[in-house]
Image (spheres, rainbow, N blue to C red):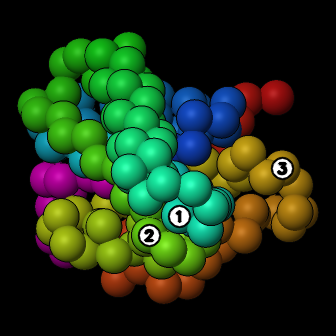
Amino acid sequence: MTPFRRILVATDFSPCAEAAAGVAAELARQLDAAVELVTVVDISSVTDAGGEPAWRQHRCDEIRREARRHLRALAERRFPAAKEVHVHVFDGGLEPPDLAGEIVRAAEALGCHLVVLGTHGKTGLAHLVLGSVAEKVVRHARMPVLTVRAPA
């Protein structure tokens, strides 16, 4: 088995994702692993909006910057002792993003050995045991996936 030297932590900034980040931070510390913090934003409604193309581009850039700012804050709060931490913002471009697909593609592209994410995100309890995004990541990722429940 490949040692877990690079851990992808997917977040939507929900309480469950925050709990997953805490678990990932402890794993990264124990394993001396690098952390790839990833969030996926939906800019499709902006790209579909009317108006000036320059305004749409500015708004998309603003959304990405805000997400990156939140990722950096999460990195400082949860991963101060990590070997190295990188932040990544992905989007689906013109289409609403396939969240699970983006997470799996990011994990593969970044050479991650483990994916850590919360069992349920901002969409709530759409599935009783495992949220739809987490479920799809578990099914499609080629590397191990650790799902974390939010504390009760």
Question: Decide: marks 2, 3 in contact (CB < 8 A)?
Answer: no
Q: In this view, does 88 lie above or below 73?
A: below
Question: Decide: marks 1, 2 in contact (CB < 8 A)?
Answer: yes
Q: Which amino acid does label 1 sit on?
A: Thr
Mark closer to the chain start, 2 or 3: 2
First to last magenta residue range? 1-8
Residue 66 is tagged as: none
Find disc 3 in the rendering and name its residue.
Answer: 124
Q: Is residue 140 magenta?
A: no
Find disc 1 in the rendering and name its residue.
Answer: 47
Q: What residue type is labelled 3?
A: Gly
Q: In which quarter of the image is the C terminus?
A: top right
User: Mark 1 falls on what kind of element?
Assistant: helix
> Dot 2: within a 10 Å radius of its alpha carbon, few (fewer than 14), some, or many (20 or more) residues?
some
Q: Where is residue 31 in the image (x, y as percent from the top left)?
A: 18, 41
Q: Is the magenta stretch mostly helix, strand or loop?
A: loop
The answer to whether residue 40 of the structure is visible from this angle is no
User: Mark 3 falls on what kind of element?
Assistant: loop
In the image, 106 versus 58, the foreground residue is 58
Find disc 2 in the rendering and name its residue.
Answer: 93
Q: Where is residue 48 in the image (x, y as percent from the top left)?
A: 61, 68
Quick check: 149 left or right of 102? right
- Separation of marks 2 and 3 at Cα, in angstroms: 24 Å
- Separation of marks 1 and 2 at Cα, in angstroms: 8 Å
Which residue sits at x=72%, y=51%?
120
Say which of marks 1 and 2 sits in front.
Answer: 1
Question: Decide: marks 1, 3 in contact (CB < 8 A)?
Answer: no
